[in-house]
Image: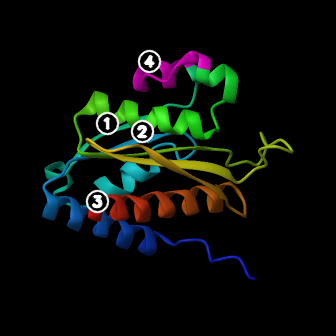
Amino acid sequence: MAAAPTPTDADLDELARQVAEVAQEKRVMVATAESCTGGWIAKTLTDLPGSSAWFEAGVVSYSYSAKEALLGVNPRTLERTGAVSEETVLEMVSGALARYGAGVAVAVTGIAGPSGGTPEKPVGTVWIGWKRRGGYAHAQLYHFDGDREAVRRQTVAAALAGMTAELKG
């Protein structure tokens, strides 16, 4: 099976427009908590005119200390499972929702490369988590192919698509 093509700027823009449409329809504010994407999800969302009507906040937290201070990730979680784990992304998305007053949040953490991978967590390993206010956080593990840019673009696309699904759910 051939790998899916890397999402283009136009693809990401369309996915962001879908998030915006449903967020406005549902009257829900959106928040992001990003590591490996470095704010790209928030940038894609806020590139849309009028995004202040439905975009609450975005946090970029690369270091352990930033994940702890900005998102409330437990230091023991980071020590036990590392930054790229289901447990960490669930705490990131829950922290973003709790701290920034949004109705729905997405969080991403992963290894975009070209270095940093291990046999257990190779480059392209990404965890994405979503949560609605009053709901349970859930996460999905992805293994994306390609260089750093491709991994990050695929992560942004999957995060936005999942956010639309979360908003509709």
The residue beneath circle 4 is 69
In the rendered image, residue 69 lying in the magenta stretch gets the answer yes
The residue beneath circle 1 is 97
Magenta span: 65-76
Q: Nearer the viewer, residue 55 or 141?
A: 141
Q: Residues within 10 Å of mark 3 (few under 14, many from 20)?
A: many
Q: Residue at x 60, y 23 (%)?
A: 77
Is residue 67 depicted above or below 41 in this figure? above
Q: Secondary structure at mark 1?
A: helix
User: Is the Cβ of the residue at disc 2 closer than 8 Å to that at disc 1?
Assistant: yes
The numbered mark, 3 or 4, whose residue comes first in the sequence reads: 4
Q: Residues within 10 Å of mark 1 (few under 14, many from 20)?
A: many
Q: Quadrant of residue 146?
A: bottom right
The numbered mark, 3 or 2, whose residue comes first in the sequence reads: 2
In the rendered image, residue 130 lying in the magenta stretch gets the answer no
Real-space CA distance between mark 1 and mark 4, rounded to the nearest whole angstrom: 14 Å
Front tag of 1 and 4: 1
Q: Nearer the viewer, residue 147 or 129?
A: 129
User: What's the amino acid at mark 2?
Assistant: Val
Q: Secondary structure at mark 4?
A: helix
Q: Residue at x 60, y 71 (%)?
A: 6
The numbered mark, 3 or 1, whose residue comes first in the sequence reads: 1
- Residue 67 locus on image (x, y percent): 50, 25
Real-space CA distance between mark 2 and mark 1, rounded to the nearest whole angstrom: 6 Å
Real-space CA distance between mark 3 and mark 2, rounded to the nearest whole angstrom: 14 Å
Is residue 157 depicted above or below 105 in this figure? below
The residue beneath circle 3 is 167
> Which quadrant, please, contains the N terminus?
bottom right
Q: Secondary structure at mark 2?
A: helix
Q: Residues within 10 Å of mark 2 (few under 14, many from 20)?
A: many
User: What's the amino acid at mark 1?
Assistant: Leu
The residue beneath circle 2 is 93
